[in-house]
Image: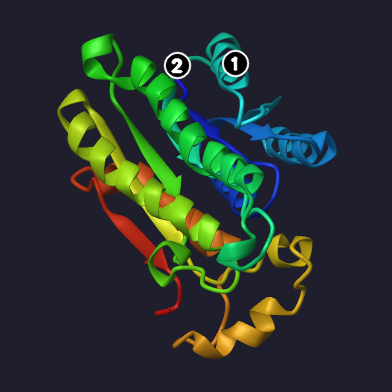
Amino acid sequence: MQQVMIVTGGSQGIGEAVARLAASRGYAVALTYQSNQGLADAVVTDIVAAGGRAIAVRAEMADEASILELYRIVDAELGRVIALVNNAGTPGPMGLIDSVTTQTLDMVLAVNVRAPFLMIREAVARMATDRGGSGGAIVNISSRAAEIGGAGEWIHYAASKGALDSLTIGASKELAARGIRVNAVSPGLIQTDLHARAGLPDRLTKMVGGVPMGRVGSTDEVATAVLWLLSPEASYITGVIVPISGGR
């Protein structure tokens, strides 16, 4: 039976790289998108053309009903999930701490913390050996901002990723005896369009000097680490947060 993976935010960036690599390694992939169906459909089309199996599901990560509907669709179309990658996230608007609004906090925490919590809850119902599942693995996409702090830019985002790290550690301890491993990766400066969308297209160029390896990372480098953590090769690893940051 083909193993099923859900990748939230799988239509672009790190999520897209994870979805493509997972499909190439034999997973049936359900990738979610929020608004750009064209990007999601293009990823699915490429995967299917290469002989893989994938579906794109529109899901609003800030809405519990949408998450429940996502799992209903995956159950019906692909089967019981065995791997989950919580990638979807939002930095919110850039600004100093004294400019952060309640609206920004509510949005960032709903997408970056509450959604992974609910995604894991629903995955447990399908993966846990004491719930009739065969076990599984979960990888959360955190950020080096959780440790660096995001000062002067995205403290709210950094704080949300710190919460995600705590969720990773706590869930790993709680779920280990139930056949589920939970880990995270913590990317640093990665070549995505996040910075351009935030209005800072030259941010990576300006900040790369702080990276000991002297370059930014690629989404493929992150995806490779994610797939390794999900694989049997990492069968005795849970509760770790792997920096993918060139030493930064």
Whether residue 23 is visible, yes or no, is no
Horizontal and vertical percent position of residue 18 = 55, 47
Residue designated by label 1: 65
Using residue 176 as the reference point, say whether residue 225 is left or right of it. Answer: right
In the rendered picture of this protein, how many numbered marks are placed on residues? 2
Secondary structure of the residue carrying tag 1 is helix
- Crowdedness near tag 1: few (<14), some (14–19) or many (≥20) residues, C-alpha within 10 Å: few
Tag in front: 1 or 2: 1
Residue toward you, 206 or 224: 206
Horizontal and vertical percent position of residue 19 = 59, 42
The C terminus, quarter of image: bottom left
Q: Are marks 1 and 2 in contact (CB under 8 Å)?
A: no
Q: What is the distance, in whole Å, between disc 1 and disc 2 at their CAs?
A: 19 Å
> Which disc number belongs to residue 80?
2
Residue toward you, 69 or 26: 69
Secondary structure of the residue carrying tag 2 is loop
Using residue 112 as the reference point, say whether residue 52 is left or right of it. Answer: right
> Which disc number belongs to residue 196?
none
Horizontal and vertical percent position of residue 100 = 62, 56
Whether residue 185 is visible, yes or no, is yes
Residue kind at label 2, given as amino acid type: Arg
Q: Name the residue: 60% across, 19% down.
A: 70
Q: Name the residue: 42% across, 72% down.
A: 148
Upstream in the sequence, badge 1 or badge 2?
A: 1
Residue toward you, 37 or 162: 162
Rendered image quadrant of residue 20: top right
